[in-house]
Image (spheres, grey):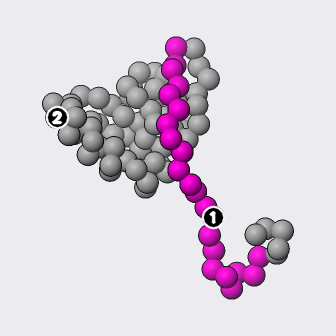
Amino acid sequence: MVRLGIAESIVHTWLSDFLGELQENYPLVDADIVVDSTTTLRSELMSHRIDLAVLMRPLLEYGIDNVELPSFPLAWVCAPDLKLPNAAR
């Protein structure tokens, strides 16, 4: 059993693909998933309540190794009739 802490943004983007590959490559490994904010997951990782955290930013803590993952595009979108000022576009 591996306990994974996953930031909310990742749950809505590529977590399902990751879990599929995990199952395919390591069929005997069960994943217990905790979804929360980076702040909460940092605390969970530091107290050893989770084994691995996938977060939106690195943690600068003694004993923590950060591995950079490929980025993915994010965008803010709204309806055109919202009439935002030009500076906000």
Q: Position of residue 9 (x, y in %)?
A: 49, 51
Q: Main secondary structure of the magenta part?
A: loop
Q: Mark 2 = which residue?
A: 27
Residue numbers of the magenta segment: 63-84
| Residue lying at the far front of the rendered structure | 70
Q: Nearer the viewer, residue 79 or 5?
A: 79
Residue 52 sits in which quadrant? top left
Q: Residues within 10 Å of mark 2 (few under 14, many from 20)?
A: few
**Residue at 16% over, 34% down:** 27
Q: Earlier in the sequence, mark 2 or mark 1?
A: 2
**On the rendered image, what quadrant is the C terminus found in?**
bottom right
Q: Position of residue 15 (x, y in %)?
A: 37, 47
Q: Is residue 4 magenta?
A: no
Asked if 78 appears above or below 69 in the picture, the reply is below
| Residue type beneath disc 2 | Pro
Count of number-bearing discs: 2
* Left or right, 9 with reference to 33: right
Q: Mark 1 = which residue?
A: 76
